[in-house]
Image (spheres, rainbow, N blue to C red):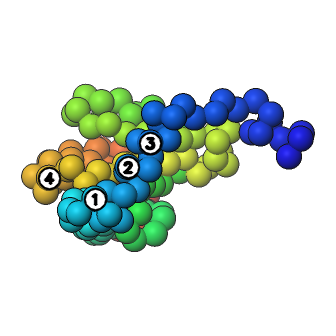
Amino acid sequence: RKKCAGSSFHNSLSPVVCQQIISSFKVIMGEDGTDIGKRKLTALRDNSNYFRMRLMDMGLHVLGHFDSPIIPVMLYNPTKIAAFSRECLKRGLAVVVVGFPAVPILMSRARFCISAAHTRAELDRALVEIEEIATLLKLKYNKSTFG
């Protein structure tokens, strides 16, 4: 503990931030007298599973677990990282692309982050755009070896 950078060089949280965290946990656990937390968690799980299933149905290689709002989609080829990112940006989609050295050189991926606030219409629009990009960049590896 004495030599760990996380313990030695981190900043403590301010009391205001600590109270926000405590209040957030109370909402999530329903201790505030509402069901907002339960509804948000249900919406997050439903949105995540819907988006993940549709990406898999498209033929994309999707990693991760069901119910997780972080959805990694494999790009594999390092040259597709910039192309995928640019095509998503052109279409107004926010995506995080990850390449070497964060992952092995041939394991590049894109990560989609799903929110409880996303509507089905927004998810469907994003999926239509992603399908166009996946076809353009030949990312449908589950349907063909060559995407």
Q: CA distance from mark 4 to mark 2?
A: 25 Å
For marks 4 and 1, the one nearer the N-term is: 1
* Residue for badge 1: 32
Dot label at residue 23: 2
Residue at the left extreme?
A: 121
Precedes in sequence: disc 4 or disc 2: 2
Image quarter (top left, top right, bottom left or bottom right) of the C terminus:
bottom left
Q: Residues within 10 Å of mark 1 (few under 14, many from 20)?
A: some
Image coordinates for residue 143, horizontal then vertical, percent: 35, 68
* Residue contact at pointers 1 and 2, CB within 8 angstroms: yes
- CA gap, disc 3 and disc 2: 6 Å
Residue linked to disc 4 = 119
Residue 55: image quadrant is bottom left
User: x and y percent of residue 16 in the render?
Assistant: 45, 33
The quarter of the picture where residue 45 lies is bottom left
Residue 125, compared with residue 48, is above or below; it is above
Dot 1 lies on which element? loop
Which element is circle 3 on?
A: helix
- Say whether residue 89 is left or right of residue 5: left
Q: State which tag comes first along the sequence, 3 or 4.
A: 3
The foreground one among 117 and 102 is 117
Inter-mark Cα distance, 4 to 1: 25 Å
Q: Amino acid at mark 4?
A: Thr
